[in-house]
Amino acid sequence: MMYAVLCYNNEEMVCGWTKEQDDAVMAQLSNVHDKWERAGKLKPSIRLLPTSAATTLHKQKDMIFDGPYAETKEALLGFYIIDVTGLGEGLAFARELAAANPGGAYELRPIQLYLPGAPINGAYASTREYAVDKAAAE
Amino acid sequence: MTDQVWIEATLTSSRAQAVAALLRYFRNLDIAEEAYQEACLRALRNWTSKGPPRDPVAWLIMVGRNATLDNKRKTSRVVAMPDEAQISDLEDVETPMAERLDDSQYRDDVLRLLFVCCHPDLPATQQIPLALRIVSGLSVKQIARAFLLSETAMEQRITRAKAKIAEAGVPFETPGQVERTERLAVVMQMIYLVFNEGYSAGPKDDTRADLAEEAIRLGRLLLRMFPAEPEAMGLLALMLLQHARQAARFDANGEAVLMEDQDRELWRPKLIQEGIALIDKAMRHQRTGVYLVQAAIAALHTRASRFADTDWAGIDALYATLERLQPSPVVTLNRAVAVSKTKGPQAALDMIEPLGERLSSYFHYHGAKGGLLLMLDRRREARESFDRAIALANTAAEAAHIRMHIDRLIAESETSACA
């Protein structure tokens, strides 16, 4: 079974850490990361930039808001990782997704740290079959 | 992380909001501060044994308020309020408190607290210490050390500032939109002043250098209160991008290292990424402001992986925008540096020479002019400019940097005299 472990903490406090404090916490965490990655169990992990760097696209209204997605009625269902030129291209991607799957919102949060982790094998590594290619072949 | 460290970090990050709300209750800075201190003392006792409350800020406000009212009651023999050991377990007591203080309430409270500290009646020399004392909670001793003053002198300065504010009257009504925007501008300026105190400190001056981080913390606080304000994004981005270069700005001997010679490996990528992400967000608003433009200039510097790759034409264009938004000889002087890269030293010198009168006592003017004259091989005039610059240096690092140029000029003239 694969799980996503979502990290929560008081952002105001974490952002207030000095570089030394932050480095110390990251060093302690990396001991845990290393152990689980060597066992092949830790897959990619990500540290996000603060919510102040977030932008939210409300899908149905196509409205853009500064800040994180604040509604509590909706639950986090999943996430994408994209490598784009900036917020503009990120929003373009989110809009295409919105057209394919309306309702709810996409929150775009810049990634501060990306660790690739152990390779993903087995059932979760679905063989790629691009919908675009399939459509072209037909 | 130990409980103790967690508690202290929580108290630090809760301070501004808690003191701000207490100021609204008591309408007096001293009482608000004392109430908060009392709440902190009780938090240290209470949270260690009972664990942290669900909403630390609401807990601190409520306990601070009750403890203060309680003291008043004791002197007038009225029945005491329930103590906080019970409160922290009673969700139903805590909940309405947290709900009543919704985000917009916190926002106006915190803005008021910050605004009070930069009251227009106060000179900047009092604004910054007062904000550091009240909003950031630094001790008078720490602030005194940062400003190279005796503790007594700093204590007096802060007391005078508080007295002046009490006289002037604190605005307690909820601000209208126009007023909110005006307050925001004044507060942003104060935060940037705090940052510059830290930024301009030398490498061996840790106490003052910490002020840069404190200003960044205040900038984050402000942006959390005004998440859609592009200038608040710009201000935070500007501070992050400048602070990102901190470790590269001085060499082992404490001398200032020019951007040109900085080891870019020492720049902090996390801060740069955050700064750039904020600029990216702010740009979407299509409303240019002075902090955003300055942040964009800093971003162009950090985006170049080598100094030679710097987009000087872009920087020149951004300074032109800044000149339009905020005409000032200092901005023109900075623009001239970019112009010297794109159009050569003569064009830059032509730009700054008319500023001579207004910037006659400005260190950077004479330093930059000396540099341009040196590039044009006008050594005698360059030496004159450097001599004036060194006499005007604000920090040891600035003086050391100019000294290096002068020493080189002297050495070269001696070599040519011998030849």
Image (cartoon, coloured by chain):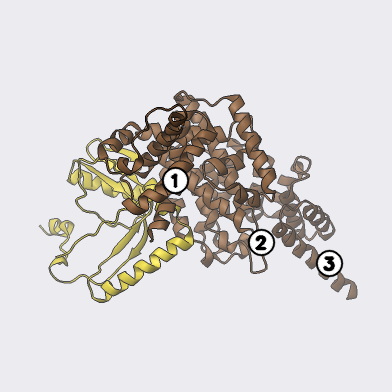
Chain colours: A yellow, B brown
In three-dimensional space, the C-alpha distance between marks 3 and 2, rounded to whole angstroms, equals: 21 Å
Q: Residue at x 48, y 63 (%)?
A: A20
Residue type (three-letter) at the residue carrying disc 1: Cys
Q: Residue at x 77, y 53 (%)?
A: B389
Residue type (three-letter) at the residue carrying disc 2: Ala
Nearer-N-terminus badge (1/2): 1
Residue holding disc 2: B256
Q: Quadrant of the N terminus of chain B?
A: bottom left
Task: Provide the secondary structure element on which disc 1 rests.
Answer: helix
Please tell me whether residue A125 is drawn above or below residue B181 in the rendered image: below
Nearer-N-terminus badge (3/2): 2
In three-dimensional space, the C-alpha distance between marks 1 and 3, rounded to whole angstroms, equals: 60 Å
Residue B386 coordinates in the image, percent (x, y): 79, 56
Residue holding disc 3: B410
Tell me: B205 left or right of B96.
Answer: right
Task: Provide the secondary structure element on which disc 2 rests.
Answer: loop
Circle 3: is it few (<14), some (14-19), or many (20+) Cα within 10 Å? few
Residue type (three-letter) at the residue carrying disc 3: Ile
Please tell me whether residue B100 is drawn above or below residue B270 in the rendered image: above
Q: Quadrant of the C terminus of chain B?
A: bottom right
* Label 1: chain letter: B
Is residue A7 or residue B87 the one in the foreground? B87
Q: Disc 1 vs disc 3: which is toward the camera? A: 1
Is residue B135 or residue B283 the one in the foreground? B135
Q: Quadrant of residue B251?
A: bottom right
Query: Mark 1 and mark 3, same subunit?
Result: yes
Nearer-N-terminus badge (1/3): 1
Tell me: B417 left or right of B145.
Answer: right
Q: Disc 3 vs disc 2: which is toward the camera? A: 2
Residue holding disc 1: B40
In three-dimensional space, the C-alpha distance between marks 1 and 2, rounded to whole angstroms, equals: 41 Å
